[in-house]
Amino acid sequence: MDLFDIVTQQIANSLILGSFYALVALGYSMVYGIIKLLNFAHGDIYMVGAFIGFTALSLLVGFLGDGWLGISASLILSMIATGFLGVGIQRLAYRPLLSAPRLSILITAMGVSLLLFNTVMAATIGEYKAFETGLGFEGLDFGNIHISYTQIVLVLATALLMVALTLFINKTIYGKAMRAISIDMDACRLMGIDVNKVIALTFFVGSALAAAAGVMAGVYYGSIHFFMGFIIGLKAFTAAVFGGIGIIPGAMLGGLLLGTLESFGTQLSWIGTEWKDVFSFGLLILILVFKPNGLMGRTEIERM
Amino acid sequence: MAILEVKDLTLRFGGLEVIDTLSFDVEEGGIVSLIGPNGAGKTSVFNCLTGFYRANAGDIRFRNESIMSLKPHKITARGMARTFQNLRLFKQMTVIENVKSGMHCRTREGALGALLRSAGQRREEAEIERVAEECLAFVGILEHKDRLARNLPYGDQRRVEWARALATRPKLLLFDEPAAGLNYDEKERLIDLIRRIREELSITIFLIEHDMGLVMKVSEKVVVIDYGKKIAEGGCAEVQSNPKVIEAYLGKEDEDGN
Amino acid sequence: MAANDGSGAAVARRTGLAGVEDRLAAFFDDRRHRYAVFAALILAGLLVPRVGSNYTLEILTNSFLYIVLCLGLNIIVGYAGLLDLGFAAFFAVGAYSTGILTSTFGWNFWLAIPPALLFTVIVRVIIGAPTLRLRSDYLAIVTLGAGEMIRIIARNMKDLTGGASGLIGIQRPSLFGLELNQISHYYYIFLALAVLAVFASDRLEHSRLGRAWKYVRDDEDAAEAMGIDRVAVKLSAYIIGALFAGLAGCFYAAKMTAISPETFQFMQSIMILVAVVLGGMGKIAGMVVGAMAMVLFPEVFREIGSMRMLVFGLILIVMMIFRPQGIWPDRRH
Ligand SMILES: Nc1ncnc2c1ncn2[C@@H]1O[C@H](COP(=O)(O)OP(=O)(O)OP(=O)(O)O)[C@@H](O)[C@H]1O
Ligand SMILES: [Mg+2]
C-alpha cells in the first residue's frame, strides 16, 4: 500500500467512524444544552437501539428481505422505539431530580446506564449477536482501496439525518423552544412554554439519533454486543466537548474531527491500534485543558 | 486615604457594556453606598472587585496594590469580604460550621495536623471556634449555632452570611443588598449592626442597597450608576438633588422613597 | 427528600420506622456512644478468628478491604461532592506498583509501600489536576474514562504488568520474622487498615480541611468568596481519597500474590460507588454498613449472580430519588 492508498482508506474510515460519533454526540449535546445533564446512559441507549434494530430486522426479514428495504424499516422502528425509551428514562429517573443537587442526578444517570446494559447482558447471556444483512461487498475502487456501497449509503444517511435535525432545530417551533429553554428555563416557563414536553422531545430526538447510529454500526461491523455503548459513549462525549457542548453543529464537527484524528492518529507507527482508545482519551484531556469550551463554543462567564 | 480605588473599570458581556469606564474611591473607615436602578451593573461591580468576573479594562487597587488578576480566594485573604445578593449559605452544614469557613484563610493546619491531632492543630481549632462564636454573638444569633443553616428563618440566614464574612477578618466588607427581604425591625438592627461593624471592628463598609431610607441613614458617600456608567457621586443630600439621579430613578420614586 | 426539612421530619416521626431512626440518630449523636460501639465492634472483630471458619474470615477480610475503599471514595464523593467513576484505578496503581516492585525488582514489601503510594498520588494528579477547574459532570466522565484507560494501559504494557494475564508470584511480606501467609494474618491486617481508615476519616472530617471539602461541595462560589482555594481543596480530597485506595491496593497485592487488570475494571469502581451511596455519602458509619452489605449481598443471594449489577443500577436510581442520604439515619436539626 502506498501513501495514496493509506490516505484514501483512512478518509473512508474517518467518515464512517465520524458519522457514528457525531450521531451519538448530538444526543449528549442536545440533552446537555437543555438541562445541563451529562447523560451517562447515552452510550447504552445507542447499544439498546442497535439491539432493537436487530430484533426488528429478524422479525421483518420474512416480509421485507434483508436488503436496504428491511434495514431502513428496522432503523426507523428502532429510532421510534428507542426515542420513547429515552423519554421514559427522562420521565422516571431524571425529572424527579431536576432541582436536586447535581451529584444526585449524575449518580442516577450512572444507575440508568448500569440498568440498561445489564438488562441487555442478561437477555443476550453476554453473547455477541451477528447482525446479518443481505448487503454485498460491491462498491467503488480507488487505487487499491475498495469502498463498499454500504459504507457510502451509511455516510449519506447520516448526512441526511443531520440536515433534517438542523431544519428541525432552526425552522420549527419546537426547535425554537429548545433553544429558548437552553438559555433560560424559568423565563420559558413563565412564557407558557410546556418545558417538560420540550425536554421530553429533546430526549426523544437525541435517543432516536443514537439508535440510528447503533443500527448503522450493527450493519457496518456485522455484530453487536451489550458492551458496545461504553467506549463509544466516552468517544461521543469527547466529540461533543470538542465541538462545544450544547452546540448542535459543534457535535457534528466534533464527531467528524474525532473520527479523523483517531483514524489517522493510529496510523502513526508509534501508536498501535491497541492504544487507540488511550489516544482519544488523551485527546479529551488535552481539549478540556486547552479549549474547555470546544471549537465552536464561546467563553461564557458563569452568572453569579 | 482610600482603601479601594477603582479606575476606568470596564466589563463587557458579548457586545453589552455592563460596566463602562467606572471610577470611584472608597475611603478607609467610611461607609459608602453603590446605588442604581435594577440591572445597572452594581452586582457586576462587586463581582469584579472580588475576582469573580475578569474586567476587560481598568484597574482595581485595594490597600495600594492592584488586585485585577487575583483569584477570589486571594482577594479575600487580602482583607476584602463579601455577602451575596441571593443567600449563598452552605445549606447542609450547621450555623457555626458556616461561620468557621471564614477563618479558613486565617489558619493553616492541613491533613497531617488533623490526623495526628497535634497540639498546634487543637489550639488552632479552639481559636477557630472562639472567633466563630464571637462573630455569631456580634450579629446576635449565637443561640442558633448548632442548627442547620437552612432551617433558620430568612432574616437569621442573612445574619449567618454577615457573621461568615466577618469571620474572614476583613478590612473592607462588601454587602450586596443586605436589607432585601428584611422586615422593619430587622432593618433597624441592620443599620445598627453596620455602624457597630465600623465603630467597634474598624472595618470599612461598601454596600449596594435599594432601600433609600437605609442608604441615607448610614452612608457618608453615595456612588450612583446607571447602565454601568457613574452618573453621580457625593454626600447623600447632594446626590438626592442631582437631576441625573432623579431622571435615572424616575418612575421608581414610589418604591424607593420610603 | 421530604424528610430533610423540619415539617417532613415531624410527619415522619409519627411513623414507627422513623421513630426508631430518630432514636438511633440521637444515640449516635453522642460521641461517647459512638466510640463505645466502635470499640465493641473492634473487640468482636479481634475475637472472630478464634471461632470463625476460613470462609467467614475470607468474607470479612473482603468487607474490611471494602470499608477502606469506601471511606476513600467517601472523601471524594461524600465530603467534596466530586463524582469519581474510576476510583478502582487507584486501587490498581497501589496493587500493581507493589506487585512490580516486589516481584520484578525484588524489593521488600514494606519498602515498596511508600513508592507505591507516591505513584498513586502522581497518577491521581495527572488525571485530576487538569480537569478540576471544570464542571462536575466533566470530572465524572473524565474519571470514568481514566479508570478504563489505566486498565487498558495495564493490559497493553505486557513487559511490566504481565498484560491481560496479569502479575503472578508476588512475594508474601513478613512481619517480625513471621511470613504472612495465613488467611487469619490478612484478616488482622485488613481489620487494622479498616480501623485506621475509620479513625483517619473521623479526624479529617472534623478538621479545617474536612470542613473545606464540604464548603466546596455545598457551594463552590461561596467557598471561594470565603477565601478557600477550591482547586487546591478538591485536589487534596482527590489525593487523600486515592491514598486510601492505594494503600488498600498494596496489601491486596500481598494477600492475593497475583493480580490482573480485570480485578480493577469499571465494575469494581461502580461497586464501591454503590456501597458508598447505599451507606449514605458523607457518613463514616454508613460506609461501614454499606461496605459490609456490598460484600455480604452476593454471598447471601448467590442465585442472583449475573443480575447483581442490574440490581445495583436500580439501587442507585431508587436511592437518589427516594433516599439520597443513604440507609443510615440522618441527623436532623
Ligand atoms: N455572567 C453574566 N453574563 C451575561 N450577562 C450578565 C452576567 N452578569 C450580569 N449580566 C448582565 O449585566 C447587567 C447588570 O447586572 P447586575 O446583576 O450587575 O445588575 P444589578 O445592578 O446588580 O441589578 P439588581 O439591582 O437587579 O441586582 C444585567 O443586564 C445582567 O443581565
Ligand atoms: Mg444586583
Image: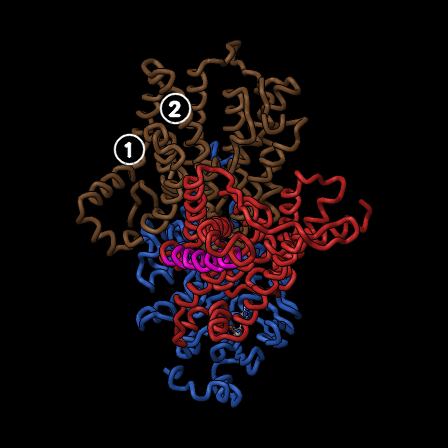
Chain colours: A red, B blue, C brown
> In the figure, is residue C282 to the left or right of B36?
left
State whether residue A134 is above or below residue C146. below
Chain under label 2? C
* Magenta stretch contains residue A84: yes
> In the figure, is residue C54 to the left or right of B230?
left
Q: Residue at x 34, y 59 (%)?
A: B140
Q: Amino acid at mark 2?
A: Ile
The part of the chain drawn in magenta is: A71-91
Chain under label 1? C
- The numbered dot on residue C33 is 1
- The quarter of the picture where residue A271 lies is top right
Mark 2 to mark 1: distance in Å? 27 Å
State whether residue C289 is above or below residue B86. above
Q: Is the residue at mark 1 in contact range of ligand 2, meaning its CB lies under 8 Å from it?
A: no
Q: Is disc 1 on the same chain as disc 2? A: yes
Please, which residue is most extreme toward the top here? Answer: C177
Across and down, in percent, residue C18 comes to 22, 45
How would you rate the neighbour count of disc 2 (Cα within 10 Å): few for under 14, some for 14-19, many for 20 or more?
some
Q: Is the residue at mark 2 in contact range of ligand 1, meaning its CB lies under 8 Å from it?
A: no
Residue A94 visible? The answer is: yes
- The numbered dot on residue C59 is 2
Name the secondary structure under disc 1: helix
The residue nearer to you, when weighing C61 against A122, is A122
The residue nearer to you, when weighing B26 against A161, is A161
Q: Amino acid at mark 1?
A: His
- The quarter of the picture where residue B59 lies is bottom right
State whether residue B164 is above or below residue C164. below
Q: Residue at x 75, y 53 (%)?
A: A141
Name the secondary structure under disc 2: helix
Across and down, in percent, residue C277 comes to 39, 42
Across and down, in percent, residue B251 comes to 43, 88
